[in-house]
Amino acid sequence: MLQFKDFGVSKEVLQGINLLRYSEPTEIQRVAIPLLLSGKDLVAQAQTGTGKTSAFGIPITEGVSAEIRKPQALIIVPTRELALQVTEELKALGKFKRLFVLSIYGGKPIDKQVSFLKKGLCHILVGTPGRLKDLLQRGHLKLERIKYLVLDEADRMLEMGFIEDIEEIIQATPENRQTLLFSATLPREILSMAERFLKPDYTKVRIKPEEPTLNTITQKVYKTSERGRFEKLVNLLRVAEDTKTIIFTHTKKEAEELASELRELGFGVSALHGDYSQRKRENVLKGFRESRFNILVATDVASRGLDIKDVELVINYGLPKDSDSYIHRIGRTGRAGRKGTAVSLMIPREERHLKAILFKTKGNIEICRD
């Protein structure tokens, strides 16, 4: 079976891979890494959870030099959350090569970001289009040494209206750069973008997003009463002990109340939902990633796009109303080839949602009764 060392990357990059505790390459990594190491431009259809960040991160950290104190790789992403996730992974991959990775996004003081750029404390730059364009226009961001350009979640950036900003940023990079475009979908507009910005001999790959993830997840549904659901949840959490767990609720109010009740019982827990400020969301996510607490109670704001490492257990505190939401929720575990468990606590009125979910998951769910 193919191992990361088989790609021929340096000892320092392999140490970074070990730091992330990746055992073997995912499908997108097996396909993309050799292509990128050979210098090919790439269009890849792949979603969060397939291992795409390391698929481009490993070749980039291999090719970037710590001796050159200027940005040599630029990863453009649609959101601040994704910028932080990508940055953390690239920091691990580049740690033993002493590579500095800088996040650039709005909502943070620009002066500190300018200071890092002026001091040459940036080998790899991860940023959102608006802030990158702002720094570029002010003359603080110089991209003449860029070897690698990545457009991550390109379809989301297109939907959010960033195309003109992205075009301006790309124009400031060298023509001989290596360009990588990652997108969950490949509509005509994305392929048109590829034709304009990538070399004519670019390679296109498609990775099926959901089936490989579901195959790594053990799924169970417990049929319980509304009164008995909380007790069942507590029992599951006590058995799981220190397991990193995400509990999904239907509403923000339910998330807050459930987190409060679990905290009173001595569990390490925090809530996360859309009413939180950007700063508070970042602090909660950082605490969860760093295992300062092991249980996150969240609404669906946390089920899409967030790549939180080492989540072993997902609990649905009630079945989602549609099968797509179910897939996205349980997809927070069993990521990048790891094993995970998804447990749903279903009350009687949610029975009608179960049929659609069973069809979507090909019936690969164990139905349990207390």
Image (spheres, rainbow, N blue to C red):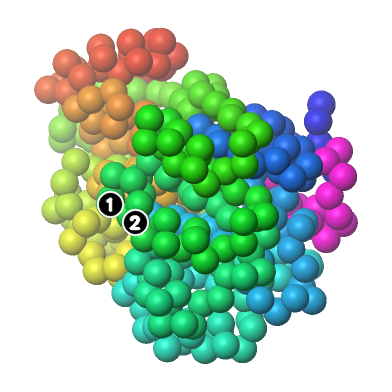
Residue 211 marker = none
Q: Is residue 268 visible?
A: no
The image shows residue 220 at horizontal and vertical percentages of 40, 23
In the picture of the structure, the residue carrying the numbered disc 1 is: 161
In the picture of the structure, the residue carrying the numbered disc 2 is: 164
Q: How many numbered discs, if any?
A: 2
What amino acid type is highlighted by mark number 2? Answer: Glu
Q: Which residues are magenta?
A: 6-22
- The quarter of the image holding the N terminus is top right
Q: Label 2 to label 1, Cα distance in Å? A: 8 Å
Instruction: Give the residue at x 16% y 46%.
Output: 251
Side (left or right) of 26 relative to 246: right
Instruction: Give the residue at x 66% y 69%.
Output: 145
The image shows residue 323 at horizontal and vertical percentages of 28, 23
Instruction: Give the residue at x 29% y 44%.
Output: 159
The image shows residue 279 at horizontal and vertical percentages of 32, 72
